[in-house]
């Protein structure tokens, strides 16, 4: 029954490139295969774009831009709202598709549909609130007009871990602002974006406003687009390493950029925390998406007096997880995205243990088929361990004890990243001090999940540039013009 549903769904996902409102094969006829990480099987073969296809996608976005920018805000808003409504109707299909191509449990995939959809609703509402100002200058010698304009054609590059939400978080504000886009989803999970492009078509989006290409040669196809002087904006979500390379390319055209990059979130538990809340928060912050989130808690910095009890309770919860294919009833932990992700988790745990940490539960890869790693808790992680420096991107919860508040702050800030932090304390003044002292763009105070379409998502330090969502999100796709006119 589920298998039939899956087969029918996969057959209805387009397998072409979406350029200028047409679905077409790659010009050189090449294809790429998409796999199910829970069993290694091919689920679909789709078009594999060449640089010529990438250019054609940009051509289409450039051609469609003037008409879309001139479309009244209310009309743009209504298309986004229709897209939101259609997504609600198709939520089960989107959830199943993400589980099949990415591996997350179905319940979490449904959560991503809800979260991803909110960007369509939020930015449909923000569309009509793009405003300027008019007034006398302080000298009284003229009138100043400040107006907002769409930046132009944009290139959006998304990662594999949240296939729908990363796409809507970029597409919705871009369209709301009046920009046209080319979007390149990750090679590992491209199907959700293709299926979403079909939804946008059904919502009545004019041809060429959104163009999608899928490719196994991201660098070769993307670089000419980024270097093309007609492109006005690059928005990237992915690793810091790739982001740095793209920033270099973008510097040539002094391109506007938004960069949502890696994280290394501290999760600080004070001795005055409510441990029940802290454990619930820890499970959500660590194991959501099988640990493969940029917001995943990476380092659990726990007061020495409660560290053993915290470890005991999270271990008990982890031992209750059910591992398997995300479509199966009751599964809470799916596969990692690929072999490399499994090898990385294994290597980080080995290094921590070699430096003196203990494994409380888990600690091994699981034999195939599929790319699974046991949900793991490691305690007494020693300074200098790689697991404290690197983004784990897997289901491994690493605990480091601390003694004083200053030490907790020092440990928490001891990273080049600054995306998000989590703090658990029942002491209000301490919570306020932590808001002021932790170097992150977002913070969960007694909360393990912070993402919300109405809030500005983004990082400090090497976690990136710009914000997605909130009132800030649309400004990433708008540019300001100041005009001086004589007094009337
Ligand atoms: P990645 O950097 O390998 O890939 C991201 C995207 O860039 C993919 O579409 C990939 O195909 C593309 N890409 C890779 N090389 C490229 C190149 N040379 N030119 C153009 N495009 C290229 O990252 P990933 O493994 O897909 O995602 C995981 C990373 O993303 C983690 O570091 C995670 O923290 C980060 N992430 C950040 C956020 C955030 O909002 N800050 C959200 C999700 C994921």
Image (spheres, rainbow, N blue to C red):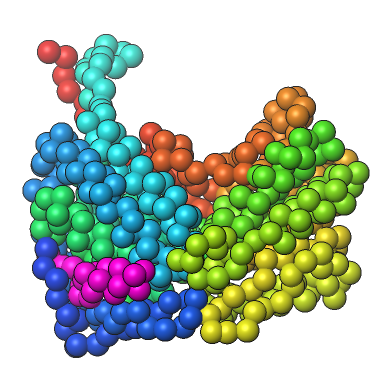
Q: Position of residue 313 (x, y in %)?
A: 78, 51
Q: Position of residue 235 (x, y in %)?
A: 37, 56
Residue 162 to residue 478: above or below: below
Q: Position of residue 339 (x, y in %)?
A: 56, 81
Residue 433 appears in view: no
Residue at 21% across, 56% down: 199
Q: Which residues are magenta?
A: 1-20
Relative to 76, 374 lies left or right: right
Residue 316 appears in view: yes
Residue at 41% across, 46% down: 115
Relative to 420, 403 lies left or right: right
Residue 435 to residue 63: above or below: above
Tag count: 0
Q: Nearer the viewer, residue 437 or 327?
A: 327
Image quarter of the N terminus: bottom left
| The stretch drawn in magenta includes residue 3 | yes
Q: Residue furthest front?
A: 1
Image quarter of the C terminus: top left
Q: Position of residue 59 (x, y in %)?
A: 15, 66
Residue 35 to residue 488: above or below: below
Residue at 13% across, 38% down: 75
| The stretch drawn in magenta includes residue 58 | no
Residue 425 to residue 141: above or below: below
Residue at 48% across, 50% down: 465
Q: Quadrant of residue 70?
A: top left
């Amino acid at each position: 029954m589920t298998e039939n549903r899956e087969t029918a769904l996969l057959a209805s996902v387009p397998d072409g490139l979406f350029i200028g409102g047409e679905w077409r094969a790659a010009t050189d006829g090449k294809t790429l295969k998409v796999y199910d990480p829970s069993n290694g099987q091919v689920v679909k073969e789709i078009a594999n774009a060449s640089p010529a296809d990438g250019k054609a996608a940009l051509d289409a976005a450039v051609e469609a831009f003037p008409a879309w920018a001139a479309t009244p805000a209310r009309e743009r808003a209504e298309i986004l709202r229709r897209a939101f409504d259609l997504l609600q109707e198709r939520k089960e299909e989107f959830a199943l598709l993400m589980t099949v191509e990415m591996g997350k449990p179905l319940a979490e995939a449904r959560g991503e549909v809800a979260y991803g959809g909110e960007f369509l609703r939020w930015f449909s509402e923000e569309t009509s609130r793009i405003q300027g100002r008019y007034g006398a200058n302080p000298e009284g010698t003229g009138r100043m007009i400040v107006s907002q304009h769409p930046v132009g054609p944009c290139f959006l590059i998304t990662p594999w871990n949240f296939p729908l939400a990363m796409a809507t978080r970029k597409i919705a504000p871009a369209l709301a602002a009046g920009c046209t886009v080319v979007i390149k989803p990750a090679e590992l999970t491209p199907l959700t974006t293709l299926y979403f492009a079909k939804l946008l078509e059904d919502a009545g989006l004019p041809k060429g406003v959104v163009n999608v290409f899928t490719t196994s040669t991201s660098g070769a196809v993307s670089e000419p687009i980024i270097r093309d002087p007609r492109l006005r904006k690059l928005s990237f979500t992915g690793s810091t390493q790739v982001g740095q390379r793209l920033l270099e390319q973008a510097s040539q055209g002094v391109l506007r950029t938004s960069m949502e990059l890696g994280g290394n979130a501290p999760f600080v538990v004070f001795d005055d925390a409510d441990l029940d809340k802290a454990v619930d928060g820890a499970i959500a912050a660590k194991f959501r998406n099988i640990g493969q989130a940029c917001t995943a808690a990476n380092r659990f910095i726990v007061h020495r007096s409660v560290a053993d009890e915290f470890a005991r309770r999270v271990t008990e919860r982890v031992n209750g997880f059910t591992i398997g294919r995300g479509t199966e009833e009751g599964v809470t932990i799916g596969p990692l995205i690929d072999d490399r992700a499994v090898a990385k988790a294994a290597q980080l745990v080995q290094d921590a243990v070699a430096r003196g940490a203990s494994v409380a539960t888990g600690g091994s890869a699981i034999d195939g088929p599929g790319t699974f790693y046991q949900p793991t808790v490691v305690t007494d992680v020693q300074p200098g361990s790689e697991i404290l420096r690197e983004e784990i991107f897997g289901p491994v919860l690493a605990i480091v004890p601390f003694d004083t508040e200053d030490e907790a702050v020092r440990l928490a800030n001891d990273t080049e990243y600054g995306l998000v932090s989590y703090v658990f304390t029942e002491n209000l003044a301490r919570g306020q001090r932590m808001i002021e002292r932790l170097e992150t763009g977002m913070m969960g105070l007694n909360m393990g999940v912070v993402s919300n379409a109405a809030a500005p998502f983004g990082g400090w330090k090497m976690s990136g540039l710009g914000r997605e969502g909130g009132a800030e999100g649309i400004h990433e796709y708008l540019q300001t013009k100041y005009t001086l006119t004589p007094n009337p």
